[in-house]
Image (cartoon, rainbow, N blue to C red):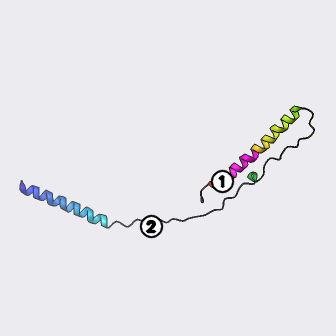
């Protein structure tokens, strides 16, 4: 019985040693290559212009003034959206 135990331990030792030696023969993994590419971000032409300011025209009633103010606010909103879009492009990390 003791003889079988010694043989089992020897076989286990040989198996572990063979596994370690065979793992040492494995080829090294290829080196990781990294490249940094910088690209210049171009702002789309649509973001370089704003809606034109409306012309007041002939004012006969308060409704005319109100309509003008609404058109003026819409033109201003267009410009604020455009500037926000440009700011978002500028805030993007390089190389994205």
Question: Looking at the picture, does residue 53 appear above or below residue 17?
Answer: above
CA distance for labels 1 and 2: 34 Å
Count of marks, rendered view:
2
Please provide percent x and percent y for residue 90.
65, 56
- Give SS at disc 2: loop
Please provide percent x and percent y for residue 46.
75, 51
> In which quadrant of the rendered view does residue 10 lie?
bottom left
**Does the stretch in magenta take in 59?**
no
Res 89 label: 1
Q: Earlier in the sequence, mark 1 or mark 2?
A: 2
Q: Which residues are magenta?
A: 78-86
Residue under numbered circle 2: 31
Q: Residue furthest front?
A: 62
Which image quarter holds the C terminus?
bottom right
Crowding near pointer 1: few (<14 within 10 Å), some, many (20+)? Answer: some
> In which quadrant of the rendered view does residue 13 lie?
bottom left
Residue depicted at 44% across the width and 67% down the height = 31
The foreground one among 79 and 45 is 79
């Amino acid at each position: 019985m003791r003889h079988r135990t010694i043989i089992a331990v020897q076989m286990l030792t040989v198996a572990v040693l063979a596994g370690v030696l065979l793992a040492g023969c494995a080829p090294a993994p290829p080196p990781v290559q990294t490249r940094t590419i910088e690209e210049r971000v171009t702002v789309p032409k649509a973001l370089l212009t704003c809606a034109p300011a409306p012309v007041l025209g002939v004012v006969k009633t308060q409704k005319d003034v109100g309509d003008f103010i609404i058109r003026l606010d819409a033109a201003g909103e267009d410009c604020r959206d455009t500037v926000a879009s440009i700011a978002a492009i500028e805030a993007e990390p390089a190389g994205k």
